[in-house]
């Protein structure tokens, strides 16, 4: 699985590069592209057939096996930011109408994720467009920013972590690539530092799932999000934490507004990704 | 579909009775039971076989066709409140371990809903227990209340509406009954008035889906939740609102902390449910 991060915001891209484990970037498991969605899609798939034959190149992965996250609103409108770019890529207003109909024109709460197969839209002619769109609402409606300065954890770190986690956990097995933008940095108004930290943590944790016991992954999630409830896991996972070199006291004292990932995930684990 | 509301808290039950449309209660589409879950289940299904044959009665609906909402935490532990009652009903700790394994021992964000078939747990002997459990996390971990007095909308009205809406929208087609307790009134610390208002509104709106156009349902949702964004629906739904006797200006000015349902849903619509 390849995670492709794409944003036109330079700060967001530079923070991703700084905050993500070097090993994930070096091995190409996570890519960062400071460009528009249109340019990225072209770069990834070279959708212009004439250019394809002229250059004699093949896209280096199939648009069939790709899913792009729509960091949308609860009603599936695609009117702004990354969603607007998505909408234009797929053909504008008629696509938005079709997309909303696939969501039954209904309300989807923040915390949900719904997979839409865009291939259906282009039938009977097949398409070389990215096939799957994951609707992950990050705002009910863009009437105002949802970020509250006094509550950065509950209105920033937590919802960004959840949206990233939901996107990765909803990754369809038929795919090999997922494209995400800087979640919550648009209308929702979450600062780039907050969004990038939670996205980086969720992506790191997602990769760590392959090597860490589930209880340890859950513990890291719980303390990252600021819910210090020892009764849930510490009694079963204490030994595992010690074996992994994760400092229990440091984990319990973790403060997402102050500390970064490497305070609770030892470098040997980050390097092994 | 029958919605069965059950809570040991008298205030919660009396607020439900006061806030829900009279027609839904009178017609038995929604029932309110001020009792324990164990007593409710016994009352609904008379699970004691001896008593069943002695009394010669049959349960008035089938436990096979029932789903009960677990207003749980993000990790599926069933340690407190209504969840503890659920856990004990299904057999205690071993059931909790099985339940968590059905959730893959993973983290489920607030906003998600996951259906678990409890029948599997009792095989090879079949069971007369309520067959389906809907895991709808309302708190990550019970380390502290999630309600913030200064933000009743974002930390109270909205999450309760979402949890109720998610529960009703996830209702499996094989079922005819759903049981819910006073959502967010336990560890989450949401005041009974706030929880009951959002539950009543979500239940009312769910029933109104049968008679209202989707855009109108979406408008009511958006303004109830305090996201006044006219660009989304007002241009398409204005005429429909007028036909239905819903006052547009009143809808736009709606304030959930001050107004109640009948401020935006005319009585002839409530009476028709």
Image (cartoon, coloured by chain):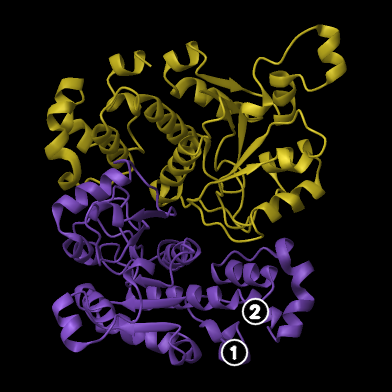
Chain colours: A purple, B yellow
Side of A188 where A16 appears, left or right = right
The answer to which quarter of the image holds residue A54 is bottom left
Q: Looking at the image, is mark 2 or mark 1 earlier in the sequence?
A: 2
Residue B71 picture location, percent across and down? 59, 43
The answer to which quarter of the image holds residue A150 is bottom left
User: Label 1's element?
Assistant: loop
* x 56%, y 67%: residue: A226
Side of B270 where B147 appears, left or right = right
Which chain's residue wears label 2?
Answer: A
Decide if residue B77 is in sight here. Answer: no
* x 78%, y 68%: residue: A236
Between A27 and B217, which is closer to the camera in this rendering? A27
Q: How many marks?
A: 2
The label shown at residue B12 is: none
Side of B81 where A4 appears, left or right = left
Instruction: Report which residue position mark 1 lands on.
Output: A272
Residue B164 picture location, percent across and down? 48, 38
Image marks 2 and 1: residues in contact by CB distance under 8 Å: yes
| Classed neighbour count for the residue bearing mark 1: other residues with Cα under 10 Å, few (<14), some (14–19), many (≥20) | few
Instruction: Report which residue position mark 2 lands on.
Output: A211
Residue A233 picture location, percent across and down? 72, 65
Between A48 and B93, which is closer to the camera in this rendering? A48
Between A227 and A243, which is closer to the camera in this rendering? A243
C-alpha gap between disc 2 and disc 1: 9 Å
Q: Is residue A17 above or below residue B46?
A: below
Which chain's residue wears label 1?
Answer: A
Q: Is residue B234 above or below residue A252?
A: above
Residue B119 picture location, percent across and down? 72, 38
Side of A116 where A46 appears, left or right = left
Quarter of the image that includes the C terminus of chain A: bottom right
Q: Is residue A21 above or below residue B268?
A: below
């Amino acid at each position: 699985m390849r995670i492709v991060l794409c944003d036109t915001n330079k700060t967001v891209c530079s923070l991703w590069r700084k905050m993500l484990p070097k090993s994930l970037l070096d091995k190409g498991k996570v890519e960062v592209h400071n460009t528009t969605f249109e340019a990225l899609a072209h770069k990834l798939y070279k959708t212009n057939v004439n250019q394809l034959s002229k250059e004699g190149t093949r896209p280096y992965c199939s648009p069939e096996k790709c899913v792009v996250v729509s960091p949308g609103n609860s009603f599936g409108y695609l009117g702004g930011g990354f969603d607007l770019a998505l909408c234009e890529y797929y053909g504008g207003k008629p696509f938005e109408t079709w997309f909303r109909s696939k969501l039954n024109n209904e309300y989807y709460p923040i915390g949900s994720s719904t997979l839409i197969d865009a291939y259906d839209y282009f039938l009977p002619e097949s398409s070389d467009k990215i096939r799957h769109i994951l609707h992950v609402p990050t705002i009910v409606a863009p009437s105002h920013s949802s970020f509250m300065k006094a509550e950065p954890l509950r209105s920033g770190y937590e919802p960004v972590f959840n949206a990233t986690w939901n996107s990765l956990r909803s990754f369809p097995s038929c795919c090999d690539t997922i494209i995400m933008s800087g979640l919550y940095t648009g209308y929702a108004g979450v600062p780039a530092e907050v969004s990038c930290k939670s996205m980086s943590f969720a992506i790191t944790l997602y990769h760590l799932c392959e090597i860490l016991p589930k209880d340890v992954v859950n513990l890291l999630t719980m303390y990252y999000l600021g819910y210090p409830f020892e009764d849930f896991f510490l009694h079963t996972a204490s030994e595992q934490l010690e074996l992994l070199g994760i400092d229990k006291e440091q984990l319990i004292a973790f403060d997402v507004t102050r500390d970064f990932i490497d305070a609770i995930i030892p470098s040997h684990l980050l390097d092994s990704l």
